[in-house]
Amino acid sequence: MEIIKINDLKALSQNVRNHPERQLEAMVCSIRDFGFINPIIINAENEILVGNGRVEAAKRAGLDEIPAIRVTNLTPDQERAFAIIENKLTEEGSWDYELLNSEIEAIGIDMEQYGFDNFLEQAADGSEPGREHIKAENEELSLDLFEDEEFEYTCDACGFRFNK
Amino acid sequence: MAKIDGVQEVRLADLVPYERNAKQHSAEQVQKIADSIKEFGFLSPVLIDRAGNIIAGHGRVMAAKLLGMETVPAAYVEGLTDEQRRAYILADNKLFELGEWNEIVLRQEVERLDFDFKAFDIDFATDAINSVESAPAPIVCPRCGHVLEVR
């Protein structure tokens, strides 16, 4: 592992992942609170194989340098294939929502800043792990009070329900 | 703020999975991770604390065991409280999820690269191609800007 200056980093190719504003903001919160503890992967030319979003977030968090793993034994095509496969395999994990909600409730840290729904995480298919996890301390009207059928779409990223 | 001070080989037998890890790894996923390790190597180090508790990399550790590896590269994370460690285990996964594929670039890469993606039993290439060519107008969440998958 080495510590590399962010200014020395370059893009490997066009990024196969988009990094929405909401993700970058949550990454900045993570870097601010936990530090930059997950090294990015780079090649011999300082090109980023994995970690483009985190590098952008590190810049925003005001970091000048970050930890990196340098990989030098892959062909150029292998490097780009690795970038795709690493992302794809990470995506294939799934949540135990009951355990996730129980952890979010038990941890005395605001998890919403890292992209979680503090009140209720639920599966993208709409199945709910149980409404007993909803905390009633918030006086504001919650969208959960409305019937699901009243809305045409549910955002599978943030849970927001809306009509076109 | 926590930090890591280097990567070293640690024995798999000394690593302790988090017993309340909410992220699940199917046997199928672990097999694919194992295939990836065989093809590219074990590149991204497991994050652990001084007691060997896994902070990030549960799926990769399972894959390494499947491959019969005895050691894996790991980085010791210094300076997290117990509560922060539990929070980071979740956040590390969630932060990734907030990103999205650029399916146009993905299709170009898969077509262009001299690499057998099918060997990884990954069928997203054809899915991505189909969804790009026949996609109706995207539905965009007005709150967070996420593009919904139209089912």
Image: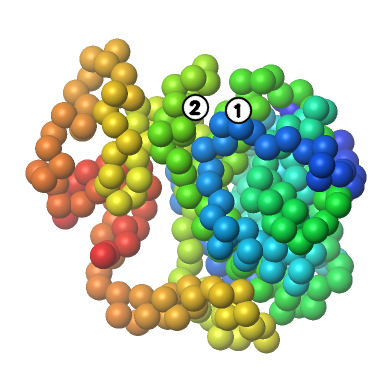
Q: Is residue A29 above or below residue B94?
A: above
- Is A2 left, or right, of A83 in this rendering? right
Q: Residue at x 29, y 39 (%)?
A: A128
- Residues tagged by mark 1 and mark 2 found on one chain of the structure: no
Q: Position of residue B11 (x, y in %)?
A: 86, 44
Which one is nearer the viewer's eye here, B105 or A158? A158
Q: Residue at x 27, y 28 (%)?
A: A131
Marking on residue B86: 1
Which one is nearer the viewer's eye here, A85 or A62? A85
Subunit ID for the residue under disc 2: A
Q: Residue at x 68, y 72 (%)?
A: A80
Q: CA distance from mark 1 to mark 2?
A: 8 Å
Q: Residues within 10 Å of mark 2 (few under 14, many from 20)?
A: some
Q: Position of residue A136 (x, y in %)?
A: 27, 16
* Amino acid tagged 2: Glu
Marking on residue B53: none
* Amino acid tagged 1: Arg
- Is A101 left, or right, of B55 in this rendering? left
Screen quadrant of the N terminus of chain B: top right
Marking on residue A103: 2
Screen quadrant of the C terminus of chain B: bottom left
Q: Position of residue A163 (x, y in %)?
A: 15, 50
Question: Do residues under tags 1 and 2 come within 8 Å of each other at their CB atoms?
Answer: yes
Total numbered circles: 2
Q: Is residue A9 visible?
A: no
Mark 1 secondary-structure assignment: helix
Mark 2 secondary-structure assignment: helix
Q: Is residue B84 above or below residue A27?
A: above
Q: Is residue A68 above or below residue A146?
A: below
Q: Is residue B6 above or below residue A35?
A: below
